């Protein structure tokens, strides 16, 4: 895996959201379960080997069908079976679909703490001052990175820091 990163097709993600009520961004957290179980899909015939990850996520258990390609894990059909907590029961539509013939295999994926989860982005329209945009463009050019990504990272770091402070005060 490329540092344990995840990839998926946005169109398949939309289909999965409609069918199961869970996004691939949410389903990837089944891989973070230290007690996850990996199974090989023996019934799948095709160019790529398919696997299942059974893991706890969001108070329930998700079954995530995935492929393992050239160093990356690609989610393909999460959310079948399992039991959900009250909060998750409203969002995930669990189904009783047959999994087929499987074989439990040794866990060959990176350790849960080594995984790099893909975040779900939200597009927004934001008006910034010309001065701020010029500053970020100049700094981004020096560092060889897109200026929008630099702004996003700054906002994410700001939010994380303040969330941490808020959680410390509440404790």
Image: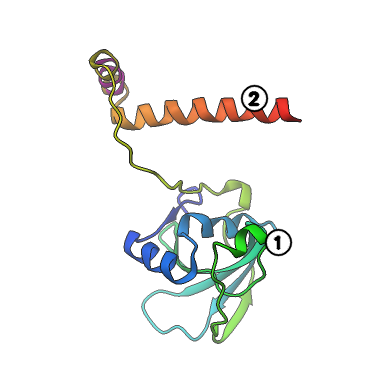
Answer above or below: position of 114 versus 48. above
Rate crowding at label 2 as few (under 14), some (14 to 19) or many (20 or more) other CA atoms within 10 Å.
few
Residue 35's mark? 1
Q: Residue at x 44, y 72 (%)?
A: 19
Alpha-carbon distance for marks 2 and 1? 30 Å
Disc 2 target residue? 165
Is residue 145 visible in the rendered image? The answer is: no
Q: Nearer the viewer, residue 23 or 63?
A: 23
Residue 105's x, y, as percent? 62, 73
**Residue 42 pos. (x, y %):** 52, 84
Rendered residue at 52%/56% (across/down): 26
Q: Quadrant of residue 37?
A: bottom right
| Most common SS among magenta residues | helix
137 falls in the magenta region: yes
Q: Position of residue 130 (x, y in %)?
A: 23, 16
Q: Is residue 150 visible?
A: yes
């Amino acid at each position: 895996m490329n540092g344990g990163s995840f990839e998926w097709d946005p169109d398949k993600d939309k289909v999965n959201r409609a069918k199961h009520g869970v996004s691939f961004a949410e389903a990837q957290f089944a891989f973070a379960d230290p007690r996850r179980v990996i199974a090989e899909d023996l019934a799948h015939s095709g160019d790529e080997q398919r696997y299942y990850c059974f893991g706890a996520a969001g108070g329930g258990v998700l079954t995530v069908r995935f492929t393992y390609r050239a160093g990356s894990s690609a989610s393909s059909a999460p959310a079948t079976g399992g039991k959900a907590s009250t909060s998750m029961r409203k969002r995930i539509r669990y189904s009783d679909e047959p999994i087929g013939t499987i074989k439990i295999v040794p866990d060959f994926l990176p350790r849960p703490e080594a995984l790099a989860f893909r975040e779900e982005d939200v597009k927004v329209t934001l008006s910034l001052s010309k001065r701020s945009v010029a500053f970020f463009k100049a700094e981004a050019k020096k560092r060889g990175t897109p200026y929008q990504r630099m702004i996003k990272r700054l906002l994410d770091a700001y939010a994380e820091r303040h969330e941490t402070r808020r959680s410390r005060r509440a404790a």
